[in-house]
Image (spheres, helix red, strand yellow):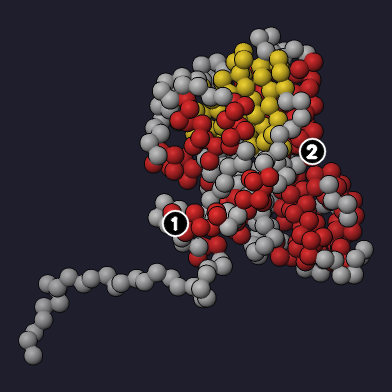
């Protein structure tokens, strides 16, 4: 046999096969390779959307046509998407601003912001027309020097993005087990598990009732605090909510349990991220950020949010800061609600800035 000089041969790296999953369709979030790469699997993505579902790792913007009609973005204008998320609304706004216009976008999520920015850059929107910043939308007043002193239109979508909901590692969903986090910015503040560890049943009841409109807040709060194991995961929280309902309903139906889970997770998310106080600050500075005649649109998903927006716009109209406001909230069309169930509770309000200086 001929001698082989192994030092002179090149060793090829072993072929690494794609990780396989059990069954016909992947169930684990990290295995959903098709949905997580929409550009590569466009056909499958369209099929999932056609079934009225949101592909994992993506987000479907809500009330797009209504928002474009309200904001009426024009070439050369400077606008702000205060809650970038997946960038769905920004993607629709940007073409309307060209040529000569510019869109600023902000988000606090350090994981999703760079992904959304990269997606919009890939569509051809460079830094000259699209500027992304990792800041809380309550701090957008700091962008005014860059924006020329004010914005022609501002959008704020107060909902959680589908990417955050779908990823169990973020702790936003009861549908899969994961750490009970619920922070929009995982690098700041305390996760929901820490909140539950140090809170009393009475204080937790107040959070569930005020932030989640949960009618069984007392029973659920007591069950969470009485849980044998610390409520540190989404599955343990879901189990505690179920136990709380059994105090009133020995066999709570699926619909009742689903609603209670949705309200509980939402209430804790709002508390962890101090979302209502952030919204109050945003509504306070909003008139300062709009140019005379500037348009604002706010999409809310919770009664507490909508009440705040309604009162702030009504007060601004009474004081002459706004020249016009929405007489009533706009809702997604029946077609959109059927095609995208996550849009069902959305309410859209708008206001137009007057020529009066903000106080």
Q: Nearer the viewer, residue 154 or 270?
A: 154
* 320 w.r.t. 160: above or below: above
Q: Nearer the viewer, residue 204 or 112?
A: 112
Disc 2 is placed on an element classified as helix
Residue tagged by mark 2?
304
Left or right: 219, with 129 as reference point: right
Residue at the far left in the pictured view: 2
* Residue 122 rendering spot, x and y as whole percentages: 39, 41
Q: Quadrant of the N terminus?
A: bottom left
- Which mark is first along the chain, 2 or 1? 1
Residue tagged by mark 1?
43
Instruction: Determine the image quadrant of residue 14.
Output: bottom left
* Residue 17 rendering spot, x and y as whole percentages: 36, 71
Q: Residue at x 45, y 73 (%)?
A: 20
Label disc, if present, on residue 204 of the rendered structure: none
* Residue 81 rendering spot, x and y as whole percentages: 56, 32
* 131 w.r.t. 35: above or below: above
């Amino acid at each position: 046999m001929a001698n082989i000089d192994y030092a002179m041969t090149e060793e090829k790296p072993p072929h690494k096969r794609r990780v396989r999953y059990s069954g016909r369709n992947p169930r684990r979030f990290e295995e959903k390779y098709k949905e997580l790469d929409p550009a590569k699997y466009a056909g499958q993505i369209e099929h999932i959307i056609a079934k009225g579902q949101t592909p994992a790792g993506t987000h479907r913007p809500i009330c797009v046509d209504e928002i474009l009609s309200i904001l009426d973005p024009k070439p050369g204008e400077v606008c702000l998407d205060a809650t970038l998320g997946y960038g769905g609304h920004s993607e629709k706004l940007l073409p309307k601003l060209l040529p000569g216009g510019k869109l600023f976008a902000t988000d606090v999520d350090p994981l999703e912001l760079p992904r959304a920015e990269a997606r919009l850059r890939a569509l051809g929107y460079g830094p000259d027309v699209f500027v992304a910043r990792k800041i809380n939308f309550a701090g957008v007043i700091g962008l005014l020097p860059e924006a020329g002193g004010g914005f022609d239109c501002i959008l704020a979508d107060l909902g959680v993005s589908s990417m955050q909901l779908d990823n169990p590692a973020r702790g936003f969903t009861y549908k899969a087990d994961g750490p009970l986090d619920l922070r929009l910015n995982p690098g700041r503040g305390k996760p929901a598990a820490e909140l539950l560890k140090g809170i009393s049943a009475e204080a937790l009841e107040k959070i569930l009732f005020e932030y989640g409109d949960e009618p069984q807040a007392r029973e659920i709060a007591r069950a969470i605090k009485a849980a044998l194991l610390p409520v540190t995961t989404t599955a343990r929280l879901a189990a505690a909510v179920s136990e709380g309902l059994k105090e009133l309903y020995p066999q709570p139906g699926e619909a009742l349990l689903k609603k209670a889970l949705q309200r509980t997770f939402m209430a804790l998310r709002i508390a962890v991220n101090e979302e209502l106080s952030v919204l109050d600050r945003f509504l306070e500075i909003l008139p300062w950020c709009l140019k005379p005649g500037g348009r604002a649109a706010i999409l809310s998903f919770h009664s507490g949010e909508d009440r705040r927006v309604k009162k702030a716009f009504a007060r601004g109209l009474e004081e002459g800061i706004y020249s016009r406001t929405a007489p009533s909230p706009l809702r997604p069309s029946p077609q959109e609600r059927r095609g995208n169930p996550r849009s069902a509770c959305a309410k859209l309000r708008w206001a137009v800035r007057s020529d009066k200086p903000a106080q």
